[in-house]
Amino acid sequence: MPQALTFEKKNVLVTGGAGFLGSHVCEAMLRDGHHVICVDNFATSDVKNIDSLLQNPNFRFIRLDVNQPFDLDQFTELAEFKLPFQGIQEIYHLACPTSIKKFDQFKIQTLLSNSIGNFYVLELAKKYRSKILLASSSVVYGARVDGKASVSEEEQGTTDQLSPRACYDEGKRFAETMFETYRQVHGLDIRIARIFRTYGPRMPLFDGQLIPDFILDALDGKDLVLHGGLEFRSALCYVTDVVDGMMRVMKAVEYPGPVNLGSDVDLLLRDVAQKVIDMTGSTSKMVEGENFAFLSELALPNINRAKELGWFPLVRLEDGLRRTVEYLKANKILLTNM
């Protein structure tokens, strides 16, 4: 078998690269010395997430919607990356709306992202013979089951295809089916990362995202609203740990199957809120708030398969919260006046 060509710098495509998680993936790829092509349509992301990257000579941003046909060879700003000759070596596919408060507004776009958007990106991977990673989600397992400690990748999960949030939950299951089918039919080198609840700098503000909302309210002395109630539980994994996990899944020599990426430590959100209050020296109180369809109590991940790839969450909750508090303190005026 002829050896694959190797290049001084890989061409790496990150779809949804201006989002919370995607922007951190872009940064990590640049630190590794790659050419990074970031595409996004800003449906639920923000250009400010990639502002610091725009002057990097190894970074290119293309505004486009992956739910529409596109041809990267036609973009003159990518000429230096020599796509017609070198192609794209890796694709991190994260493009999908992920808004809590605006979930209903983006339902159709979410359906399209998890179907036709996947088709166009998979066809691109087929064209360039790219290794491609799907940012899937813990929602493929369905809601947490009482008495069940964690879920492993072999479990099928239970979701309701007619539920108000099915466009995302069932959409991610269908996305995995599409990726697996392209592997079976076209021999694509696919990777699937099932990402559990993640937090850190650049999370969307004022969108029902628990951690940034907690921090901003604490800094302003407002009540911290516990959407889901006082007994709402979740695991939380810091964003750089998740990105490291995605990179390890991508670098695995052989396809490991879907891989859970997240913390396996169960937390009461009221305890997390109290940590935020203590860290900020706030006088805020906690109150119960309304439930959102996109915010649900999810299962904990069994991360044994990720451990086999050498991955384990390294950032302690206290350290991750502190970094996020410091980020929001430093950028509060800019971010809250966007």
Image (cartoon, helix red, strand yellow):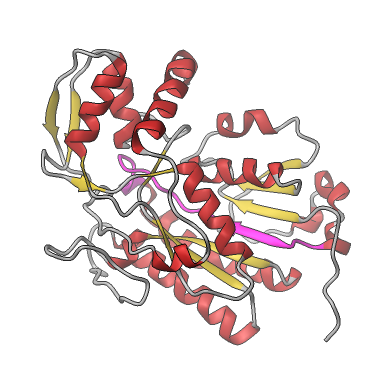
Point out the stretch of residues depicted in magenta.
Answer: 87-105
Is 102 included in the stretch rendered in magenta?
Answer: yes
User: With respect to residue 267, does 328 lie above or below?
Assistant: above
Observer-nearest of 92 and 245 = 245
Report whether residue 41 is seen.
no
Displayed quadrant of residue 291: top left
Please provide percent x and percent y for residue 100.
32, 43
Please provide percent x and percent y for residue 122.
61, 69
Observer-nearest of 31 and 104 = 31
Please provide percent x and percent y for residue 246.
54, 56
Observer-nearest of 237 and 69 = 237
State how many labels appear: 0
From the viewer's perspective, is 233 left or right of 114?
left
Q: Quarter of the image containing the N terminus?
A: bottom right
Please provide percent x and percent y for residue 327.
47, 23
Report whether residue 182 is seen.
yes
Is 263 included in the stretch rendered in magenta?
Answer: no
Instruction: Please report the residue visible at 20 percent of the width from the left and 27 percent of the height from the top.
Output: 274
From the viewer's perspective, is 57 left or right of 15?
right
Displayed quadrant of residue 279: top left
Instruction: Please report the residue visible at 46 percent of the width from the left and 76 percent of the height from the top.
Output: 177
From the viewer's perspective, is 39 left or right of 241?
right
Instruction: Please report the residue visible at 67 percent of the width from the left and 68 percent of the height from the top.
Output: 125
What secondary structure is the stretch in magenta mostly built from?
loop
User: With respect to residue 142, does 332 lie above or below?
Assistant: above
